[in-house]
Image (cartoon, rainbow, N blue to C red):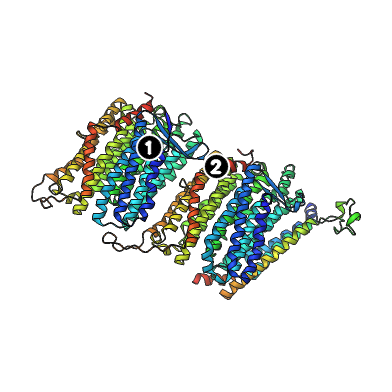
Amino acid sequence: METIVSIKPLLAVLVSLLVVPILVSSRAPNVREAWTFVAAAAKFLIVASMVPTILNGAEIVYTVAEVIPGVAIKFRVDALGMLFALVSSSLWIVTSAYSIGYMRKLKEHSQTRYFCFFAFALSATIGVAFSANLLTLYLFYEMLSLATYPLVTHHQDPEARSSGRKYLLYIVGTSIGFVLPAMLIAYNLAGTLEFGRQGFLAGTGSKPLMALLLVLLVFGFAKAAIMPLHSWLPAAMVAPTPVSALLHAVAVVKVGVFSVVRVLTGVFGTEQLLALNFSPFILLAASVTILVGSFIALSQDNLKRLLAFSTIAQLSYIVLGVGLLSPKGMTGGMLHIAMHAFGKITLFFCAGAIFVATGKKNISEMTGIGRRMPVTMAAFFIASLSIIGLPPCGGFISKWYLVLGSLEAHQMPILFVLLFSSLLNAAYFMPFVYKAFFCAPHEAMFKNTVEEAPMFCVVPLVITALISIILLFYPQPFFRLASMMVQAITGT
Amino acid sequence: MGDLIQLLVAKYNYWIYITLMMIGLYAMIAKNNLVKKIVGMNIFQTAIILFYVSIGSKKGGTIPIIEHGHGAAGSHVVHAADYINPLPHVLMLTAIVVSVATLGVALALAIKVYERYNTLEEDEILAQIREK
Amino acid sequence: MSEQYPALLVVVPLLSALLISAAGWLKKRLCFPIAVVALGVAAYASIGLLIRVLNEGVIIYRLGGWPPPWGIAYYVDHLNGLVLAVVSVVAFINLIASQKSIEEEFPEKTGAFYTLYVLMVTGLLGIVVTGDAFNLYVLLEIASLTGYGLIAMGQKDRAPLASLNYLYMGTIGACFYLLGVGYLYIVTGSLNMVDIARILPPLYQSKAVLTAFIICMVGVWLKMALFPLHAWLPNAYTYAPSASSSLIAPLMTKVMIYVMIRLILTVFTPQFAFSNLAISNSIVWLAVLAIVMGAILALAQTNLKKMLTYVIIAEVGYMVGGAWLGNRAGMTGAILHIVNDALMTLCAFMVVSNIVYKVKGYAFEDLKGLLRKMPFTMGAFVIGALSIIGVPPTCGFFSKWYLISGALKAGHYGFMVALLFSSLVNVVLFFRVLEISYYEPFSNHHVGDHHPEPMAEAPLTMLVPLIIVAAGLVLVGLYTGDIVNHIIQFAIPKGIV
């Protein structure tokens, strides 16, 4: 495995931080937005420029500072990190466009603060993606929690206040209360925190101690919304929709689940997990979250809350995939990071577009909306196919690999969970889509004219919906990256 | 019993200073009047000063001054056991100065408190504070 | 010139205090420049001294050339080189930042204030640099008396009484220390710290040495406000004027922690303190109590300054516990925390200083909407809060790292739980404050062009030092590895594992 030293990872993280002073000082909103685009494009380009190197089998490292003997703040770009970074940086560009349309149409306040903290949040997300060890991951994880607080509580009303508190309580409480002691115990045991090919904790402690650390680390990264530490996510839906879209469908929650995947592969290692037989525990936690999350989603009327619970369930697919500890399962799980991101962000964009155009938030008030906003609902339909896991959308590939993975690992109950949850996904999406397009004229709640949301809102969601379709036929480079990572882990 | 009395008599300087310290401490804690507390603090400090001075004394020792000691006359060997130790006295000069300075600051603060609250009794002051 | 640094850093501020006092009578405008020059020289000398120690090793400076044990020797090694640099830099930055607030709070007494300020820094620097046990008492009293004066200059209502209560307890503490030194003198006949350490080992079994140690410790604990000897601190630091509290709060308790560590490591040697006495465990539990009580009492406060004073009490618990864990990680954490806590407390109290300057109050209700009105100050407050909570890459995280590592190594899980509990409580404390400053009363924030309240920041001379300190918190955090490897590692004797 060739290792190249380059400052590019640090640049990728810093580019959005550096643009913040410019954002703060610019008077005209157009200048401010333009600079946001510049930063998003720059970040994407820097990340994309590293893709060829990674696809060739090399890794890029960069050490910032050795802050504790043996542990440095350090970046390492490997296949998994690159996959995640590509997803989030590309989606930032799209979300910035969407934000402009959304915030301007609704005449939201404090837009400068919004764009600045968005930039911070993306910095932190890329930082997590490129972390070389648990300490750096923790650092950027915390930075993300703090950067997203002003975004979640943007509206500054009492509801935002209480949701913000819940957000902090769950996320910061678990990271300080669970992850920090686990990290220190792990450091004391192993003397290092670097993510290893087969985990750095392999063979350093007794089974009960490993079990304790596993529980602390898996549940400590509460951004992964594994039950029972999931309730911050529906509460965070008070945020403006672009925040929910990028952060809570892509950045924040994916950071959580990415951290859990790193814990399973880089801290513990698949061999050790197999040897200690921890896989059932992980699978159980993930399955419970999937099933319960999907069931709760069925009962939701508020569209964003439904999507929130759907997200909770979908995230655990990723954990499930990696928890299967079989090559196909892990590939499916990692690939789902990308597939779910594109699909879910489309769904959230649609929800926001509906709110901007009609002011409606609840499904019960949206009968017949397909007549009025056909483009939006078509995108919604495509994205929901991706989430359910049906062709012609990318989600089909990841679900397929998850199914293969569960067969490979001889876990028949998991196969059942996968199939049943897909049914549930269909059950909470399809009725809405059907009612939106096909309803008796007297039931329609909207006039028959086509009146979409502003351009800046509609174009991004069309783009992401199209990408969801394209990903089925051409899932590169995500598929290649996921397979490379699995190969590196299993040594095949 | 004989042992105890012997202990008391032999180490009487320790017992005196401990007693004085306790008196001072009692005054600082139990007395209500600010000036009495300050006096107690002073007694506490004086006890320690006395203790230091007492440890310098030696049985049969005399004042540590050598007559006509400068020049050639002072360059002979001195039996340290004949002279009491001057170092603790010197140290305590410093400590006395510190004690006096502390006393001054404390009294100045007490005056400021009196100017504001018109009383030097701590319970009355606290009552006035609570009222506000 | 650089051989004279140890003396310079005490003598220059001392003499300048006289000059300032004279200038206060004759020409008030000269007071501040003289103070700046004095503390600037002291800071320069301390940093120069630290560099010398890093290059040459331990430095012994004999005042007046008298050899020990007759003369007073200044003894500078890695431990106090580091603390000296921190103390002088903190005092210097604070002086510059407080100028406006001093002019505003007592315009007629600036001469007196600067005199006391510089004298206090003299005392603090002297405590850290000296190698003589009695000299330490003298300088301790210099620092304390000037401290009482500085605190008493606050609001007429509460400050003199708070200062008087501090005076009582502080004097008892210093007297206990003096008594302990007396016992040591009886037993060893020497007052020089290194000399005492040389003479003591055969005498470790004697009751006098044990008494000396315990009395010294109790005296030092009183002065550093270790729970339950802390009762003087909240009132004294809260009612002091802003400029005084931002000088005294970061420094006084940390310097006393330094004294405790010096007594453990150099005078009484770790072998006596940790092995011969069996009290380490109990003291760590006492520290746990301090941390927990500090956290709980802080939660009960409704006024920002008092809340911060209880946070200080908890931080003292961190350092005492870390030092008494008896292993290298814990001691590293304690020494690192001296540096980090001085900076964090400075940042927090300078924020309060800025807030008081603009808003004239420091209760929670006064903080409404401050995030918008004073964004830079509150931004620095956020960084300070993150450091106190212990979020990387700020420095507070790294000292917590070492402290928890030390607790794990020593098997003292109670201490680890207390540290985590304290972090979580700090999250609540600081986010409560940030919430109040963030959720200003908004009428209709969704629609229309909302005219934000105009920014009313503190003046630049108060803001720029604050931003420097906040940036320093992150920089010191990133450079932790260097600080530990090049300085602190050598400050701890090899015997401690």
Residue A262 place in picture, x, y as percent = 39, 35
Considering depth in this image, is A461 or C401 the residue closer to the camera? A461
Residue A470 place in picture, x, y as percent = 22, 35
Q: Is residue C222 visible?
A: no
Give the left or right position of residue A361, taking residue B7 as reference. left
State the image quarter where residue A479 is shown.
top left
Compared with A8, C255 (above or below) is below
Point out the residue furthest to the right here.
B73
Type of amino acid at the residue the image marks with label 2: Asp
Q: Is residue A357 visible?
A: yes
Residue at 38% x, 45% y is: A15
Point out the residue furthest to the left here.
A441
Considering depth in this image, is C28 or C236 the residue closer to the camera? C28
Residue A30 place in picture, x, y as percent = 29, 53
Give the left or right position of residue A114, taking residue B125 as reference. left
| Mark 2: secondary structure | helix
Residue beneath disc 2: C482
Residue at 17% x, 51% y is: A365
Considering depth in this image, is C149 or C424 the residue closer to the camera? C149
Considering depth in this image, is C146 or A182 the residue closer to the camera? C146
Residue beneath disc 1: A260
Chain letter belonging to callout 2: C
Dot in front, 2 or 1: 2
Compared with A32, A223 (above or below) is above
| Mark 1: secondary structure | helix
Disc 1 crowd, CA 10 A, few/some/many (<14, 14-19, 20+): many
- Distance from the alpha carbon under mark 2 to that under mark 1: 31 Å
Give the left or right position of residue C89, taking residue A249 as reference. right
Chain letter belonging to callout 1: A
Q: Circles 2 and 1: CB distance less than 8 Å?
A: no
Type of amino acid at the residue the image marks with label 1: Val
Please tell me the numbered disc located at residue C71. Answer: none
